[in-house]
Amino acid sequence: MIILGSTGSIGVNTLIMAKKFNLKIEVLTANKNVDLLNKQIKKFNPKFVVIGSKNLRKQVNHKKVFFGGEGILEVLNLAKSKLVVNALVGFAGLKPTLEAIKLNKKIALANKESLVVGGKFVDTSNIFPIDSEHFGLWYLLNDKKPKKMIITASGGAFRDTPLDELKNVTISEALNHPNWSMGQKITIDSATMTNKLFELLEAKWLFNIKKLDAIIETKSLIHALIDFKDGSSTAHIATANMQLPIAYAVNKKIKTQIVKPVDLVKVGGLEFREIKKDRYAIWEIKDDILKNPHLGVIVNSANEIAVEKFLQKKIGFLDISKITLKAYQKFHNVKPLSIEEIFIIDKEVRKFTQK
Ligand code: NDP
Ligand code: MG
């Protein structure tokens, strides 16, 4: 298979699953982390590799090293593998998703941003989600017709922080996720609840369902719930470990144990909470964006800039959502008519947000 973003949190877990199932790796890609990429090359012997920039090329121990976003597209065309794991982070994942679709490859999609920004124009028929909630929904569906889908959130790093302390929280506090170990951006997105907003859009495009919502379950053991017409609901319960969705995304016939089963007696109790606007300002637009899912591109582009600025200590934690909401208002009337327009809008929103 092809693994885009092999040095990231999802990428590393994908390689563990590849080893477990004896799957061959044709492509590995990284942005900057040459050391880990070189270790992965030694262990998995890929045919092609891609690194983020030209000046890092010489440091990569491989004969066929491509570079940059164009390099990823080139390699997708050269590789014979039918399966692409897109574990890139952010808007950079969109073009590879589109290219893989064009090439008729199957996509194991961790890069939710591809759907958040371009969902209206992305054919999802060859996409299998690597996201615990969407995997949970898929697992529960079982050919039955759902009435409503509900995904859960952990509440992120600041779910219990007094509201008046939120404006002064630090980067390291924001990166301290209570239940999951993930890359930086998604960990910040969890703290602001923007990740859950993205996941509602992701669910909308994947399952084409109108009734969608999210609630907090503080232990991240229930990942998704489905309400059916008859009044019954089912819940997907599993240990918080991405290897389970990844295993299904790369190998549909799972016959062995991937994660330890949850012992509910040991767990003792579960706690559910409503997602509230006073703690998670971004939740203000939840209903509106579900009615206007094409606006996902606005939220994503503004959020990417804002998260970057927060990580550079240029803005405070609460400014991330404040800035994103400002961009959302400013560009609310935008109606992209093609995927090409998504790229134009993305640039515009970034320019506005930078200012
Ligand atoms: P990481 O930041 O850990 O990894 C991102 C990967 O993409 C790294 O290999 C990185 O390279 C590479 N990369 C980053 N920027 C670029 C770029 N501009 N061009 C090319 N490559 C780039 O992220 P995660 O693994 O946490 O997340 C990946 C995706 O999966 C995200 O969309 C996230 O929302 C989603 N996801 C993640 C989950 C998790 O548990 N981590 C759970 C559910 C979804 P380098 O290492 O060299 O910087
Ligand atoms: Mg998720």
Image: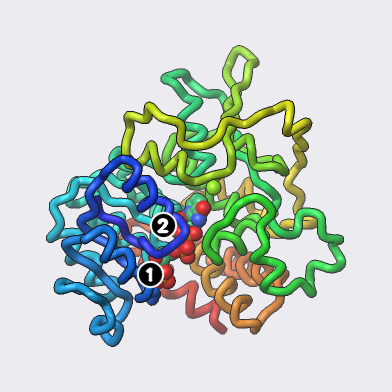
Res 29 → quadrant = bottom left
* Tag 2: amino acid: Val
Q: Which residue is mark 1?
A: 36
Say which residue appears at 63% left-offset and 35% top-offset.
222
From the viewer's perspective, is residue 342 above or below residue 290? below
Q: Determine if residue 162 is in view.
A: yes
Mark 2 C-beta closer than 8 Å to ligand 1: yes
Residue at x 76%, y 54% (from the top left corner): 159
Sequence-first disc among 2 and 1? 2
| Left or right of 63 on screen, residue 324 | right
Amino acid bearing label 1: Leu
Instruction: Pinpoint residue 304: horizontal percent, then vertical percent.
Output: 52, 69
Indicate the position of residue 340 as horizontal and vertical percent values. Answer: 30, 63
Q: Is residue 212 visible?
A: no
Residue 279 left/right relative to 32: right
Quadrant assignment, res 322: bottom right
Q: CB atoms at circles 2 and 1 under 8 Å apart?
A: yes
State the mark number for residue 93: none
Vertical position of residue 68 compared to residue 244: above or below: below
Answer with the quarter of the image where residue 65 lies.
bottom left
Label 2 packing within 10 angstroms: few (<14), some (14-19), many (20+): some
Relative placement, left or right, of 338 versus 238 is left
Q: Nearer the viewer, residue 244 or 287?
A: 244
Q: Residue at x 55, y 34 (%)?
A: 260
Image quadrant where one finds the C terminus? bottom right
Say if disc 1 is inside 8 Å of ligand 1.
Answer: yes
Q: Position of residue 237 (x, y in %)?
A: 59, 31
Q: Which residue is mark 2?
A: 12
- Above/below status of 152 relative to 98: above
